[in-house]
Amino acid sequence: MIPKRCCDHNATKFFGTKLTCLATKVMVAFLFDEKPKSAVYIGDNLKYLQRRSTAHDIYFDVIYIDPPYNTGNHFSYNDKRSKTEYLNFMRKRLVLAREILAQSGVIFISIDDSQLYSLKLLCDEIFGSQNFLGNFITFQSQRSNSRFINTIHEYILCFAKDKKCTPKFTIKRLESPEFREGIMKLSSKVKKEFQQNGQKIAEKLLSKEIYEIAKNPDWNFIKNYNLVDESGEIFFAKDLSVPGEPNVLNIPEIGLKLPKLKTRRWSSPQKFIKLFYENKLSYKNNRPYEKHLLKDSDDNVSSILNFYSRMGTNDLNKLGLRDLFDTPKPVELIKYLIRIATNEKSKAKILDFFAGSGTTGQAVYEINNEDKKNHIFHLVQLDEKLSPKSKAYRFAQDNNLSPTADQLLLKRLEAFCKKYAINDDFEIRRVNK
Ligand SMILES: C[S@@+](CC[C@H](N)C(=O)[O-])C[C@H]1O[C@@H](n2cnc3c(N)ncnc32)[C@H](O)[C@@H]1O
């Protein structure tokens, strides 16, 4: 990796304060051909946030942060402030974070029991309680040494900049940990049957499988997906009639002529034309239906997420970075959060200003790759000294890296991009003191 090192610039200062924000933005874009790029910022996130909020040069669709939980458990960074100090530390950053959120943007904040309640109140104050979208629960690896309650979960608070402008959260079932494996198993079984014995037999097998699977109430939706199309894909045929006076529908453009139904009318011609061109019309007994493929099916987002903290450790082990970070978040968890909040966007901007090992960077690269998106990330990480007692410190020494946290993050992104042959096109910038 040959990183491009350059300094964060403050456009308003450069051009003089008289320029309006918009004029400044346009001139910067013109002179520097400035397209937003992914970047890792090294330094204090407060400085980064101050700069972004005065430069008005980028607004983020998603901010994810996993701040220190103030538990005193981490020897590699300052994780023990008084309650007031901690809240002040967070307040300063969250106020600025709100300013650089896009109007439709959302912020996710990982936190545990110890700070949840005060942090929620702080966020209510900064973002407005009307913009609280919910609180997720995720699982932590079991700790067995607890005398009273063995806490095996933590939280992710979620706030919108402006709830009215925030698009609905949805997730493809195939991307959700509850359903992914089951759907993949069912689809491949049915496809195999389809290839060997054809559509009708595959549908018979499908209905047997559905009977078993739907015994679990969480899988009730599967009852609708009882058909197999001409490529062996499982789908659900949605009715295309609506309440109203029965009508004959004639759409020469797509060669469709439909007789009157008994008690209902057909959906609009525009709907039929759209579905025709999207290849989403299917026929049963000569009647057209809207085709919904199981692999594209969406689900709404529930508050309990089946992600376990140890998955984050496994993600790093896979990159050969065992035990270098205390609490990396699972890549799949961050992908899930980004996806639910950006499902309509192809070029979302994602910020993590407590970047740690850089999980959010890897998550963005993986989404771009899997979903054909062009999201970009900004990661901010303090060049905090690692404890000489830590394994991370020894790792830095062995690899000729300076023993600071930012170097480990860069190493992680480098290892990930190398392993999966991904173009590591991010810049490395230093947040000016
Ligand atoms: C809980 S860790 C984040 C872990 C991360 N989510 C991951 O998956 O690896 C918090 C990180 O924030 C960093 N940090 C703490 N204060 C900071 C500050 N003022 N500016 C930038 N980074 C900071 C710490 O060095 C630590 O690496």
Image (cartoon, helix red, strand yellow):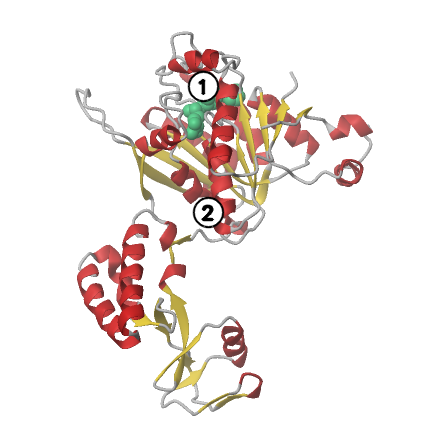
Q: Position of residue 278 (x, y in %)?
A: 51, 70
Residue 346 or 10: which is nearer the viewer? 346
Residue bearing mark 1: 86
- Residue 86 position, x and y percent, is 45, 19
> Mark 2, mark 1: which one is toward the viewer?
2
Residue 176 appears left or right of 379: left
Q: Is residue 77 visible?
A: yes
Which element type, helix, strand or loop, lies under badge 1? helix
Near mark 2 (Cα within 10 A), the count class, few <14, some 14-19 or many ≥20, is: many
Q: Is residue 215 left or right of residue 95?
A: left
The residue positioned 44% from the left and 42% from the top of the image is 335
Q: Are marks 2 and 1 in contact (CB under 8 Å)?
A: no
Residue at image position (44%, 33%) is: 109
Residue found at x 58% / y 45%: 103
Can you see residue 88? no
Quarter-of-image position of residue 317: top left
Please state the horizontal and vertical placement of residue 156, each as a whole percent of the image.
Answer: 39, 36
For the residue pair 388 and 416, the one nearer the viewer reads as: 416
Q: Is residue 276 above or below residue 134?
A: below
Q: Quadrant of residue 380?
A: top right
Instruction: Determine whether 389 is above or below 278 in the image.
Output: above
Q: Residues within 10 Å of mark 1 (few under 14, many from 20)?
A: some
Instruction: Work out which residue is located at the far top of the displayed protein and give it.
Output: 388
Amino acid type, label 1:
Tyr
Determine the CA span between mark 2 and mark 1: 30 Å
Q: Is the N terminus in the top left, top right, bottom left or bottom right quadrant?
A: top right
Image spot of residue 282 (x, y percent): 41, 77
Q: Which residue is mark 2?
A: 339
Amino acid type, callout 2: Arg
Between residue 171 and residue 146, name the one nearer to us: 171
